[in-house]
Image: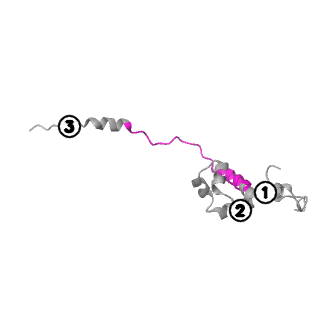
Amino acid sequence: MTQVIRICPLAGLLAIGKRSRRRRATSRDPERTRELLLQAAFQEMCRSGFRSADLDAILAAAGVTKGALYYHFDNKKALGYAVVDEVIASNLRQKSRPYGMPRTPSMDWCALFSPNR
């Protein structure tokens, strides 16, 4: 008995239409990503306050994904604490007098803590 194998003519078309779903390898720098998030969050929080700070605006300013944000920080509150601990505290140390007092007590807080000043 002879066996007949039939090949579907559409099978070749389906194989041609498939594309590789492999993504291009990107260089990841977690420290740089975290720094971008902290700086963007600082600017957004100075502009609109902590409660009104928009995570989507922070993500857009930093140029990172929401997954990157939640990789580094558990939630918005953790991001806020990190901004205070890492951005504001380090900027205050750089701009304070030897005794730890700001130059003038009436300075605008965001201007005082801004890394650009």
Q: Nearer the viewer, mark 1 or mark 3?
A: 3
**Does any portion of residue 81 appear in the rendered image?**
no
The residue labelled by disc 1 is 90
Residue type (three-letter) at the residue carrying disc 3: Arg
**Neighbour class for label 2 at 10 Å: few (<14), some, many (≥20)?**
some
Q: Check the image and name the residue furthest to the left.
A: 1
Asked whether the residues under the numbered discs 2 and 3 touch, taking CB atoms below 8 Å apart as contact, a structural biologist would say no
**Does any portion of residue 89 appear in the rendered image?**
yes
Residue 1 lies within the magenta run: no
The front one of 94 and 57 is: 57
Q: CA distance from mark 2 to mark 3?
A: 67 Å
- Secondary structure under tag 2 reads helix
> In x, y percent, where is residue 33?
65, 50
Residue type (three-letter) at the residue carrying disc 1: Ser
The front one of 90 and 37 is: 37
> In x, y percent, where is residue 98?
90, 59
Q: CA distance from mark 1 to mark 3?
A: 73 Å
Q: Residue at x 36, y 35 (%)?
A: 16
Q: CA distance from mark 1 to mark 2?
A: 19 Å
Quarter of the view holding residue 12:
top left
Residue 41 lies within the magenta run: yes
Residue type (three-letter) at the residue carrying disc 2: Phe
Q: Counting residues from the N terminus, which is met first, the one under dot 1 or under dot 2?
A: 2
The residue labelled by disc 2 is 50
Quarter of the view holding residue 51:
bottom right
Q: Quadrant of the N terminus?
A: top left
The residue segment tinted magenta is 17-43
- Secondary structure under tag 3 reads loop
The residue labelled by disc 3 is 6
